[in-house]
């Protein structure tokens, strides 16, 4: 059975909105190494509609010369969880999965294998609540936002996670990888 590997840029106070606030921190090559490891076995990309709409115009025109991640983002099949988007022709290899359905996502994991999720805050929070996230990869930036969408909103059920990896980069960013305790997975 496949796994869902979530990657998020997050502020110290847990905000995961559009990460324009990360631009002040130079990209550390070791961050690319960590993300390459996260995506290395992923056979599909699972995205919410808003993230797909932000990613499509940015990634669809990038080449490997622009960003080493471009082949993964452009060549890998993308599945968009949405009840409103119908036209995915703006970005190759994109398919509408339909509205959120945890059973459909479980089936997709079984059919496809490992799936990568980036951004997609609403989708990720719902999958966390449904026990669908198998690995959580956070790039924690040394900044507080004060407000904005949080990875764990108030009222979400408590959970315990096991650390898989932790790295500190010279730009002040920390990479943290966690897996849920086995008794909490769905």
Image (tube, rainbow, N blue to C red):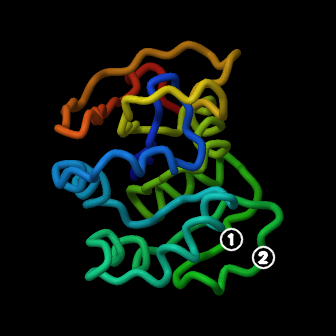
Q: CA distance from mark 1 to mark 2?
A: 7 Å
Above or below residue 178? Residue 20 is: below
Position of residue 31 in the picture relative to residue 159 (left or right): left
**Residue 20 coordinates in the image, percent (x, y):** 51, 51
Marks 1 and 2: CB-CB under 8 Å? Answer: yes
First reached walking from the N terminus: tag 1 or tag 2:
2
Camera-nearest residue between 176 and 140: 140
**SS under mark 1:** strand
Image quarter for residue 126? top right
Above or below residue 146? Residue 85 is: below
Mark number, residue 115: none
Residue found 28% across the figure and 51% down from its top: 26
**SS under mark 2:** loop
Mark number, residue 96: 1
Residue found 30% across the figure and 34% down from its top: 177
Position of residue 24 in the picture relative to residue 101 (left or right): left
Residue found 62% across the figure and 29% down from its top: 129
Camera-nearest residue between 128 and 71: 71
Mark 2, residue position: 86
Position of residue 81 in the picture relative to residue 143 (left or right): right
């Amino acid at each position: 059975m496949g796994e869902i590997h979530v990657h998020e840029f997050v502020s110290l106070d847990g905000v995961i909105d559009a990460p324009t606030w990360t631009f002040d921190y130079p990209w550390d090559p070791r961050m690319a190494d960590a993300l390459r490891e996260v995506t290395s076995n992923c056979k599909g990309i699972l995205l919410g509609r808003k993230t797909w709409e932000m990613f499509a115009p940015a990634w669809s025109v990038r080449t490997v010369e622009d960003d080493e991640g471009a082949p993964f983002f452009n060549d890998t099949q993308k599945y968009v969880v949405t009840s409103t988007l119908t036209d995915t022709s703006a970005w190759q290899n994109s398919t509408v999965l339909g509205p959120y359905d945890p059973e459909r996502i479980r089936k997709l994991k079984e059919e496809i294998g490992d799936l990568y999720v980036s951004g997609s805050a609403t989708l990720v929070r719902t999958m966390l609540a449904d026990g669908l996230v198998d690995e959580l990869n956070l790039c924690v930036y040394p900044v507080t936002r004060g407000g904005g969408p949080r990875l764990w909103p108030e009222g979400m059920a408590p959970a315990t996670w096991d650390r898989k990896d932790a790295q500190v980069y010279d730009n002040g960013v920390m990479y943290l990888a966690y897996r849920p305790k086995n008794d909490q997975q769905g």
